[in-house]
């Protein structure tokens, strides 16, 4: 059996682009997995509504495994739940590798490698080491529609929450800000791009500040654009 890959799904542009590049290279991507907090019906990584993550998976034509986390959640519990989810995708989907959208943070990569070291799954990093300025521009040119759903106001202007990542957004980033937000400057939700069979209709909800971050909520809208 050849490589069978599941993508660690944050709902944002980097995991979405990792999916796109793996497929473009002819790799067998068989599913997505993410962690969710059932108490809030949100994806734990980016705080996106669970129904929007499910809509992304449907648009990608892939199953989505949701690993449920309690709230609050210790790192010990997070790792146990994640390892249980990885065991499921190995047994039920035949997954041999897990793809992450990480770009250059060595400590994050080392953590993921350590977490998977005791499993039957190998980590892979399709975007690792890319020039993030070029990568962000490539995503925009390819038609990625990435909505800024979280901003660290110590790094970016609060007004950037709720914007779409486009050439204007990238030009407005501060000189010390990473174009892809790899240091946590911002996080995104992707509603369209070459990895999807159709666009997702979303609309911006409330913008609120909590726990030191500015969040722009996204809501499902009424219709979707279907591509042939």
Image (spheres, rainbow, N blue to C red):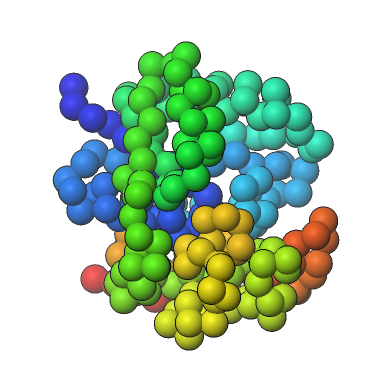
Q: Nearer the viewer, residue 193 or 107?
A: 107
Q: Quadrant of the C terminus?
A: bottom left
Name, please, the residue furthest toward the bottom.
168
Question: Residue at the top extreme?
Answer: 118
Q: Is residue 37 above or below residue 81?
A: below
* Camera sees residue 88: no
**Left or right relative to 189: residue 129:** left
Where's residue 80, x and y in %? 63, 21
Q: Residue at x 63, y 77 (%)?
A: 160
Of the pair 225 and 135, the residue shown nearer to us: 135
Residue displayed at 36% across by 25% down: 122
Tell me residue 94's x, y (percent). 32, 24
- Residue 107: % across, % down: 53, 36
Q: Quadrant of the N terminus?
A: top left
Task: Please report the residue visible at 45 percent of the width from the left and 27 percent of the height from the top.
Answer: 113
Q: Quadrant of residue 224?
A: bottom left
* Residue in the foreground of this view, choosing between 88 and 110: 110
Above or below: residue 40 compared with residue 146? above
């Amino acid at each position: 059996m050849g490589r069978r890959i599941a993508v660690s799904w944050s709902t944002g542009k980097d995991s979405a682009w990792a999916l796109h590049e793996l497929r473009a290279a002819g790799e067998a991507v068989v599913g997505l997995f993410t962690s969710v907090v059932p108490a809030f019906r949100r994806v734990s990584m980016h705080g996106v509504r669970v129904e929007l993550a499910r809509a992304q998976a449907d648009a990608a034509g892939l199953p989505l495994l949701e690993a449920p986390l309690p709230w609050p959640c210790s790192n010990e519990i997070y790792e146990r739940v994640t390892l249980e989810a990885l065991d499921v995708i190995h047994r039920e989907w035949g997954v041999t590798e897990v793809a992450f959208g990480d770009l250059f943070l060595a400590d994050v990569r080392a953590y993921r490698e350590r977490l998977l070291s005791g499993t039957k799954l190998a980590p892979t990093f399709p975007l690792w080491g890319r020039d993030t300025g070029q990568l962000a521009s490539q995503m925009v040119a390819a038609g990625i529609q990435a909505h800024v759903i979280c901003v660290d106001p110590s790094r970016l202007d609060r007004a950037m929450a709720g914007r779409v990542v486009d050439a204007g957004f990238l030009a407005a980033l501060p000189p010390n800000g990473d174009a892809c937000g790899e240091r946590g400057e911002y996080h995104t939700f992707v509603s369209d791009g070459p990895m999807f069979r159709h666009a997702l209709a979303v609309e911006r909800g409330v913008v609120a500040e909590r726990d030191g971050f500015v969040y722009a909520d996204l809501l499902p809208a009424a219709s979707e654009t279907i591509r042939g």
